[in-house]
Image: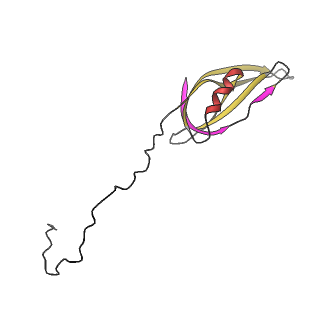
Amino acid sequence: MDITGRIKLITDIQEFGSNGFKKREIVLTTDDQYPQHIIIEFVQDKTALLDAYQVGQDVKIAFNLRGREWVNPEGVAKYFNSLSGWRIEAVQSSTPPPMAPPENLEQVDNTNKEANEPDDLPF
């Protein structure tokens, strides 16, 4: 699966436990009618993929959907989902850049126009 959006946040690398498990999260804002803020985690060696990106960039992220069950001490099962990223690439913004004004446009000089000169516009 993949998702496209603008980077809202990139967290620092977090390390857990003595086995050196690493995780880094990114939040994307989608360009939908009702924008969504989607969190995607990158783990272990994939955390380095986020080094080349910054807040405000438009990106496409490939991810896997993960789900797990956790049974609390009272014996009630809870279910959790996560999006695990494995590839990220920059995409071009869908908004075109603002156009620069054309250079060397000739200015029309109406100062010498005679007052009685007919206007040749049809309306």
Residue 89 covered by magenta stretch: no
Residue 66: in sight, yes or no?
A: yes
Q: Is residue 60 left or right of residue 118?
A: right
The kind of secondary structure the magenta stretch mainly shows is strand
Residue 76 % position (x, y): 80, 22
Task: Name the residue: 40% across, 51% down.
Answer: 99
Residue appearing at x 34%, y 56% in the figure: 103
Residue occupying the point 13% across, 77% down: 117
Q: Where does residue 73 sit, x and y in percent of width and height?
A: 87, 22
Q: How many marks?
A: 0
In which image quadrant can residue 109 be found?
Answer: bottom left
**Would residue 101 appear left or right of 43 to someone viewing this image?**
left
| Res. 8 image quadrant | top right
Relative to 16, residue 53 above or below? below
Q: Is residue 77 above or below residue 35?
A: above
Farthest front residue in view? 104
Q: Quadrant of residue 94?
A: top left
Q: Position of residue 27 (x, y in %)?
A: 64, 36
Residue bounds of the magenta highlight = 1-15
Is residue 68 toward the left or the right of residue 65 in the image? right
The structure residue drawn at horizontal position 71% and vertical position 25%, both measured from the top left corner, is 80
Residue 104 position, x and y percent, is 31, 58
* Quadrant where the N terminus is found in the figure: top right
Magenta stretch contains residue 10:
yes
Q: Quadrant of the C terminus?
A: bottom left
Report whether residue 81 is seen: no
